[in-house]
Image (cartoon, helix red, strand yellow):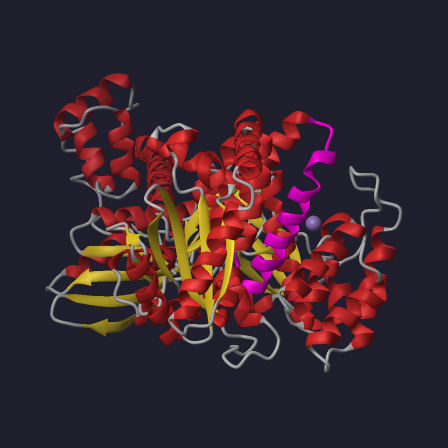
Amino acid sequence: MLRQYELVERVLAYDEDADEAILNRAYVYTVQKHGAQKRASGDPYFSHPIEVAGLMTELKLDQETIVTALLHDTVEDTLATIDEVEEFFGPNVARLVDGVTKLSKIETLTENERAAENLRKFFLAMSADLRVLLVKLADRLHNMRTLHYIRSEEKRQRIARETMDIYAPLAERVGMYEYMREMQLLAFEQLEPEAYATITGRLAHIRNQEGGQVDAIALKIKQALAEAGVDVEVVGREKHPYSIWGKMTERHVTFEQITDIMAFRVLTESPDDCYRALGVLHQTWQMIPGRFKDYVSTPKANGYRSLHTSLIYENSMRVEVQVRTRQMHQTNEFGLASHWAYKQDDRPDGQVSWLRDLIEIVDASHDAEELLEHTRLAIYQDRIFAFTPKGALHQLPKGATAVDFAYAVHTDLGNSAVGAKINSRQMPLRTQLANGDVVDVIKSDSSEPQLSWLGFVVTGKARAAIRRAVRDKERQEVAAIGAKLFEDISERMPTKIGRKAIKAALKRLDMEDEEELMFAVGSAKLSDREVMEALVPGSTSALPNDIEWPRQERAISIRGLTPGMAFHLADCCHPVPGDRIVGLRQLGKKVEVHTIDCLRLADGVDSDWLDLSWGERSTGAVGRLRLELYNRPGTLAEITQIFANNRANVMNLEMIQRDENFGTFEVDLEVTDVAHLTQIVASLRASDAAAEAERI
Ligand code: MN
């Protein structure tokens, strides 16, 4: 394990301006917080974050990244909080540690909750700051290095599989080939122990038999180039056991049939020398057609630059050769991480996203495949990923709200949602989610979807479910109201109305069943007179033309307020009895009563939120509707008739806008309660005069 002074010295060796005190403090903090926790190896837990920080110093990463590496498990696994981290180490480190912590939630998911592709997208979307991903990759690399200490075979397998499916491809995606190869090798050893043993055994055998073959060929290459006046360094190596295994399975060949098990790297001083070296190699040995690739003039999307070719050595052996400058090599092996290395000339400033680097690289290239790769990345940017409290991951379009999330989990959850805790904080249902949010949907069996939700949901699933639920409920309510009105009408009839009379009326009105009749009455498609006529033809001839009805009685009481506390119904959402309501209380002011989905609630985060409900027998309030009326004569009269049929007093009617086809009106109506208002909305929608009617 790296000692405290060793770690600090390593950082100071490449960054003399590094803040020694902060590095020391972070080292001590992680040791203290992890305390007596132990790793599977028996080592103290804090050896892990310290080794991860050590890995980050090898990439010469900036001080914030080193501190993040030291603290990366404190918030998840100890009593430390993100607020405390921010207090001691500043907002940037807190943001980075928070990012790594969120990425770690992945590891608690069950098998079917995480399709590997989903997760890779998630990681990329989460890693707005590449350093978060770098620390996470180093974390995983160190865990893989110590994997053999874990007792449970099943757990080892799971971690190795995860590394193969998620982390190694991510390391490749951001160009960290060193990390990718080591992760693959360690995972391969775990997942395919027999294949691993066979291949490494064979490689050792060849090495012993043909002793020093790799070194001899490297020397020949160096000499050939030196004779032509190109000064280079040549590094030879056997191919990685995992990449040999990949070829064996991919091409269905045996180990003996694989001829190119050796690879050589030629490191030059300048790009010019790369091409000169290549010319010499192709003149000295036979090249294999189709294997030459020029990534110097056309780098890969992740910035990788090199020339690749394959040669036939001494008439039988195929060898792979990569030619690149030393500087390209550094960038290649650590990919975009090298952008963060301390004081490099082309280092972007702290806030520039690594994705922008990537896009710049892609823009500069003309390779269709690379552009495709870039497009895939861009797709992830319109998605967000949020978790249930149990850790299930849901992918949603950007702009999705807590309601969309609830419906994504389950239609029933959406239909009974009344609120949401986002990252443990109570928030309005309309709140837009951010990547990595943990969303706990609060439900109530007595609750129903609100029409107003349609104003902010973005997913088709939520939209369809809300429409269906609202329509069903509306129909039921209207029919129930219709039944009451019908009872009323029946009592005013000169004769008692029984089954028979109703049946006859249905026939006269050409209706299917009683429900249809009650809906028609409730939605005022039929006036009282029409109903009476249908029941007993001729029964209305003696009635006066206009029926008066009493003004709305107003009696509002609110539960949940301290007795004597003054309140007023908010002008923005016009709550009426039956709406779910909350109160906003600010010192020295009346409590504002809002509907639970009012837009203005978002402004009220500083107020006290009071959980309110309507007192029994509360009745009479002003509801506000927006109407879209067809622009033709008579529509206003029709609408007024609907209000009259529904016994609602118009308090105010205002035209907001008018064009060739439509007029938009806002109308304030005195109604008894939300059911009454719903009934009116249903009647308006059923009429030919209104194109749209909704509560504001
Ligand atoms: Mn860790």
Q: Quadrant of the N terminus?
A: bottom right
Main secondary structure of the magenta stretch: helix
- Residue reaching furthest top? 500
Horizontal side, residue 558 vs residue 531: left or right: right
**Split into 4 quadrants, where in the image is the C terminus?**
bottom left
Locate residue 391, reporting x and y percent: 59, 41
Can you give x and y, in whole percent of width and height, for residue 494 in the image?
27, 29
**In the displayed structure, does residue 562 sit left or right of residue 170?**
right
Give coordinates of residue 555: x percent, y percent: 55, 54
Outermost residue, front direction? Answer: 227
Q: Is 427 on the left-hand or right-hand side of 579?
A: right
Is residue 423 visible in the rendered image? The answer is no
Q: Relative to residue 28, is residue 327 depicted above or below? A: below
The question of residue 129 being in magenta is answered with: yes
Residue placed at 17% from the left, 27% from the top?
Answer: 511
Q: Is residue 647 magenta?
A: no
Viewer-proximal residue among 16 and 166? 16
Residue at 61%, 36% (x, y): give it: 159
Say whether residue 621 is left or right of residue 197.
left
Q: Position of residue 332 (x, y in %)?
A: 47, 63
Q: Which of 29/183 is in front?
A: 183
The magenta region covers 124-152
Which of the 4 image quarters holds residue 250?
Answer: top left
Residue at (83% x, 51% y) in the render: 34
